[in-house]
Amino acid sequence: MHTQKLRPAGARLGRPPNQKKLPRQSRSKFTLDVILEAAEQLLRDGGVAAVTTRRVALRAGVGLSTLYDYFPNRDAIIIQLANRLMQRRQEEMAPELVASQEKSMPELFKAIAEYAVANDRILLQFGDGFHSRYARFFHCGAYDPQVNGAASKERLTGFESVLHSMLADHPAQVGEADVELAAFLLSRVIRNTINTVVEERPELVQSPSFTAVIERMMLAIVDCTLPEAATDRS
């Protein structure tokens, strides 16, 4: 897909534009789905530059005034479109983390690395400028327009707790004695590494080696040791 910056580089907003109208009736939900489906079709066909309020309204078969009942501007549409794509990715990812005791640490870390990088690849579809302004509102793949420092820390703590449980489920594979420290570092290293690459060399996010490197970093942090049988299978 083509990328285009939605605003000049470096431009930031204190809060992202959000939906104006929250659908409660089935008809309103249907209209919202039609609008977002039209936006997704335009994105697939012509990249982010093709997603304008006028084109989305025309493709959706709704009046421009109706579209503005739901979205105040183009950015608000694209934010919800990105949220929709990331929720879809989250649903695809969920089975990979179910029954974590049955998976090895490399399998789990591979799934986590792929999920984390995929989130940023989705956001980068909408341009570097979009990512720089709004990526922090999609923390760990969940969108929250009201995110602040406290909320961000709370989410990281939640992710850290999930990682801690995973490590505790695999005591024979975790060589690092301080599991609490390992879980803390994992939660921060994943996010900060991806952020640094996106900010300084965004093209490297598309490298097929990127997720593999992050996976190796995670394995090094926990000093992973696989049972001999598992090593023979690999």
Image (spheres, rainbow, N blue to C red):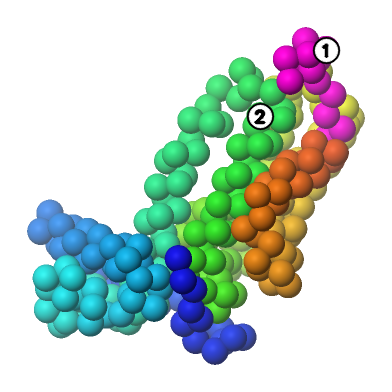
- The residue under the point 65% across, 44% down is 113
Residue 165 lies in the magenta-colored region: no
Q: Is residue 8 above or below residue 112?
A: below
SS for dot 1: helix
Residue 156 visible at all: no
Q: How far separated are the C-alphas under marks 1 and 2?
A: 16 Å
The residue indicated by pointer 1 is 228
- Magenta residues, start to end: 222-234
Residue 65 spot, x, y in % from top left: 15, 82
The residue indicated by pointer 2 is 107
- The residue under the point 12% across, 78% down is 63
Residue situated furthest bottom in the rendering: 8
Residue 82 spot, x, y in % from top left: 42, 62
Residue 24, by quadrant, is: bottom left
Camera-side residue: 42 or 11? 42
Camera-side residue: 107 or 4? 4
Q: Is residue 106 above or below residue 120?
A: above
- Is the residue marked by circle 1 packed among few (<14), some (14-19), or many (20+) residues within 10 Å? few
